[in-house]
Amino acid sequence: MTPRLRSVVLDTTDARALAEFYRRLLGLGYREGDAPPPDGEPSTPPCPTPPR
């Protein structure tokens, strides 16, 4: 039996930038209401980091 890659996980500290990279790479557009905020305006607040 040959092993097969079934899924890929991409980890990043800047999910918006990674999503934008792949959106452009694949030639995709935004759905209505999904475009990022204008430069200088915050996106959604970051998730709190769980204590260690």
Image (spheres, rainbow, N blue to C red):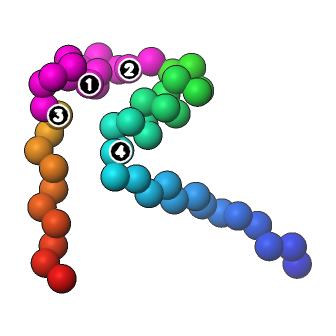
Disc 4 element? helix
Q: Which residue is mark 3?
A: 43
Where's residue 42, x and y in %?
13, 32
Q: Which mark is first along the chain, 1 or 2?
A: 2
Where's residue 41, x and y in %?
12, 24
Between 31 and 10, the residue placed more toward the observer is: 10
Disc 3 element? loop
Q: Which mark is first along the chain, 2 or 4?
A: 4
Q: Is residue 2 above or below residue 6?
A: below
Question: Which mark, residue 36?
Answer: 1
Q: Which residues are magenta?
A: 29-42
Cα distance between the residues tagged 4 and 3: 11 Å
- Mark 4 belongs to which amino acid? Ala
Q: Which residue is mark 2?
A: 30
Disc 1 element? loop
Q: Is residue 33 above or below residue 48?
A: above
- Mark 1 belongs to which amino acid? Pro
Queried whether the magenta region covers residue 1, the answer comes back as: no
Which residue is depicted at the point 16% across and 66% down?
A: 49
Contact (Cβ within 8 Å) of mark 4 with mark 2 = no
Contact (Cβ within 8 Å) of mark 2 with mark 1 = no
